[in-house]
Amino acid sequence: MELRLAGIVVIVGSYGSGKSEVAIHLAIHHRLAGMPVRLADLDLVNPYFRSRELRDPLAQLGIEVVLPARQYLHSELPVLSPVVAGIIRQAEGLTLLDAGGDPVGGRVLAALGDAFAAAPPQVLQVVNPLRPATGTLAGCLRVRREIEAAAKLPVTGLIGNANLIDETTARQIEEGYRFMQALARESRLPLVCITAAEELLGEVAAARLACPLLAIRRQLVPPWKTARPPGRQEE
């Protein structure tokens, strides 16, 4: 089943959902399929595990990474690059906006409301059902309401990202998929895709999934680990 997104796509999610990792891999997936891709890092909340950390490897793949001005790269202040509004208004191919988690990140999106007026974006909520805040349907719906209220944008789709980092099993991914199906029914939103680490792809019964499977090669790792370069899967 093919995963294809286009236009302006905003990636949101609660802290620990893995939304930045998902945004990075959506960018890589579509770029390797030949699509022009831009990734704007709007996460001004979490100082760790932000998509901007991969700006050089992503640029080598031909992905344009839009960041705040250099003097604000490590700032926690709500500083937005003036380029961001421009790429929203003149989007081509796929433009991904990696927004900060929870309501604080949503308020950054609200500040871009005028830019969204001409073409409302897709807003995809990344959910990790193995995290306490989103381990129940009620918790996921609460997070969604908080993000929507802060961002002044409706969530339009879901991405399942069930993982416990290095402790994740194929069974947990499949159980996470069933959880996301139930959430999609409860939310009346489409399940756009679920994720799985590359090393678990052979164990996940992808043929039984009713949505695309996005392969993850973890890039945002702690300082004591080294990530494999992003790109095509190794043979």
Image: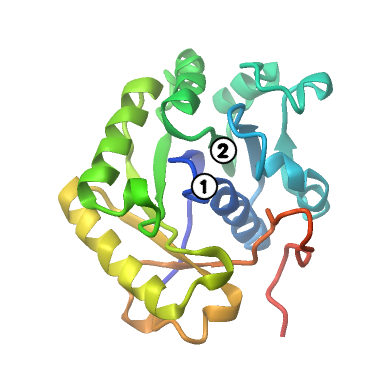
Side of 79 where 23 appears, left or right: left
- Marking on residue 52: none
Image spot of residue 187 (x, y percent): 20, 46
Against 112, is 211 above or below?
below
For label 2, count other residues whose C-alpha is less than 10 Å away and answer few (under 14), some (14-19) or many (20+). many
Q: Residue at x 32, y 29 (%)?
A: 146
Side of 128 where 32 appears, left or right: right
Q: Residue at x 73, y 62 (%)?
A: 230
Q: Is residue 188 visible?
A: no
Q: Residue at x 32, y 81 (%)?
A: 208
Quarter holding the N terminus is: bottom left
Image spot of residue 215 (x, y percent): 55, 68
Against 208, is 89 above or below?
above
Quadrant of residue 51 within the rendered picture: top right
In this rendered view, identify the residue nearer to me: 90 or 8.
Answer: 8
Image spot of residue 112 (x, y percent): 51, 17
Badge 2 marks a residue whose secondary structure is strand
Badge 1 marks a residue whose secondary structure is helix
In this rendered view, identify the residue nearer to me: 89 or 113.
Answer: 113
- Marking on residue 19: 1
Q: Are marks 2 and 1 in contact (CB under 8 Å)?
A: yes
Amino acid tagged 2: Asp
Amino acid tagged 1: Lys
Residue corresponding to mark 2: 98
